[in-house]
Image (cartoon, rainbow, N blue to C red):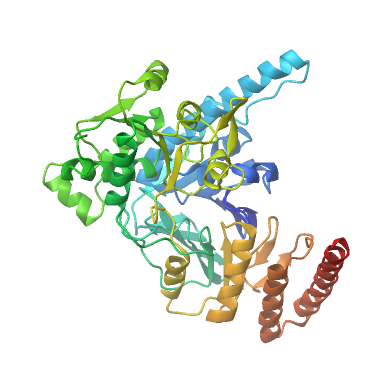
Amino acid sequence: MKITFCGAARMVTGSSYLLEVGETKLLVDCGMLQGEDEDKVTPFSIPPEELDFVLLTHAHIDHSGRLPLLYKQGFRGKIICTKATNDLCGIMLLDSAHIQEMEAMWKNKKSERAGKALVEPMYNIEDAKGALTLFESHNYNEMVEVNSNIKARYVDAGHLLGSASIEVWATEGGQTRKLAFSGDIGNTDQPIIKDPTYIEEADFVLVESTYGDRMHETDGNHVEELAKIITDTFSKGGNVIIPSFAVGRTQELLYLLREIMEKHLVPQHDNFPVFMDSPLAVEATEIFTRDSKDNYDDAAMQLIENHINPISFPSLQMIVEAEQSKALNTFPQPCVIISASGMCDAGRIKHHLKHNLWRKECSIVFAGYQAVGTLGRSILDGAKKVTIFGEEIEVAASIYKLGNISGHADKAGILRWLKAYKTPIKEVFVIHGEEQTALGFANLLIKDLGMNAYAPKIGESFDLLSATITQRTAVPVAAENELTSTLGQLVQLARKGDAQQTAQLKKEIQALTQKWQATLSQKADKK
């Protein structure tokens, strides 16, 4: 019985974990790599036709985006998830396939002109449709008999409509181990959806660490903060452009904007125009409205009971057609435009940035995580100029980031999720975080909480019966926090009395120390 880390290990995107229990092989998530992680794409760990199941935590593309590729390469097992995740994947995977096809077409036009070889899309619409035929949905808290040696239960992760943490009971040779996959742990007090559900026991835990090195801002009120930005921008005659993830974040923003309208918080601009410019967001909003039962929190359900749609208002206009989107560039009055993608690396948002980023009277409002290597991250980090569609654009607009509007738990939230376990955890695997963040959070768990914790590398495997790492990848050039983390692992293994593993880790620490010292010497020589 073993688990192999196939994605989102010392990186944020591409979540994928291979669990082998006897003859059963299953993946937990099958996500796409994004931002600077795209260069780290690797083939599937085993031939897809040998996989029996996929357990899917939620619909976001960094967790589900390679499912059509899995189907394309021969997978025909079940994809098990919640009902809302099933519904959202029904639109998101088709949208992803369309993007793959369009990007391949664009690259091939350039390749033909340059006499270069043509490329194929990662997958196409038919592959996505094929993958969707394999979906099987279940309710939260329902015990799912995956097969004779695997049971699973989905509990609300509070991150996205339908998102789940997954409890897995795996039995091999008469021995059972319980694993808990956190998925993406939600932030508390988000609009619309419920807070995360906590799990109380597991032998092994895989926990995300997206914000494992920081705390969300807690001061202020989202509604008032956004209302002030809109008021100030409109007073200058500018537009408010909000890059937003089409699924989840857009619906939260609509919730806030409805309240702003209801309370008349933008003086002299009652019922100001709001354009939701994303066909995917339009479809997702319909699903959010339809799947409210069992997913909405008490405040949102109270609105529904009072015959108020929590994510709609009269001045909201849904933009689907491309010509409608282009027309927004000459709209005659200040407006709010919400458009995807949330990290500005694709989609209609790039057109809106091209037409508004250089205007001093406009504002760009970021309302979600911006991965390293994306256009959104560059703008948020203070770039003076950016390149969009081959054209250099000056960044003259005001740049804002809404505080504490995040779908992910911060460091305190992740720790709260872990502290809910009432029995000792054999090993905590820290995943889904940038390398330094994951290493630092693992070290925090070791030093401050006395937990056995490790931030695995891509390709490493862990034997769940003997609780040992069975396959290590090559050790990279040492950084101080990696050395600290590895020392922490040595302490753990020494406590377990595992002489062989301890000896191996001592050798790795010696190698790391030598490389680290050499790096320091080189830096000193340069000075």
Q: Quadrant of residue 304?
A: top left
Q: Position of residue 271 (x, y in %)?
A: 20, 33
Evaluate whether residue 337 shows in this view: yes
**Residue displayed at 56% across by 26% down:** 124
Q: Quadrant of residue 485?
A: bottom right
Task: Establish if 262 lies above or below 430.
Answer: above
**Residue displayed at 40% across by 15% down:** 323
Quadrant the N terminus occupies: bottom right
Residue extending furthest left?
306
**Residue displayed at 86% across by 68% down:** 521
Viewer-nearest residue: 12 or 517: 517
Quadrant the C terminus occupies: bottom right
Q: Position of residue 314 (x, y in %)?
A: 19, 31
Evaluate whether residue 248 shows in this view: no
Viewer-nearest residue: 248 or 390: 390
Viewer-nearest residue: 208 or 370: 370
Q: Is residue 62 left or right of residue 308?
A: right
Badge count: 0
Q: Quadrant of residue 336?
A: top left
Residue extending furthest right?
525
Viewer-nearest residue: 220 or 249: 220
Q: Position of residue 420 (x, y in %)?
A: 41, 74
Q: Position of residue 144 (x, y in %)?
A: 41, 56
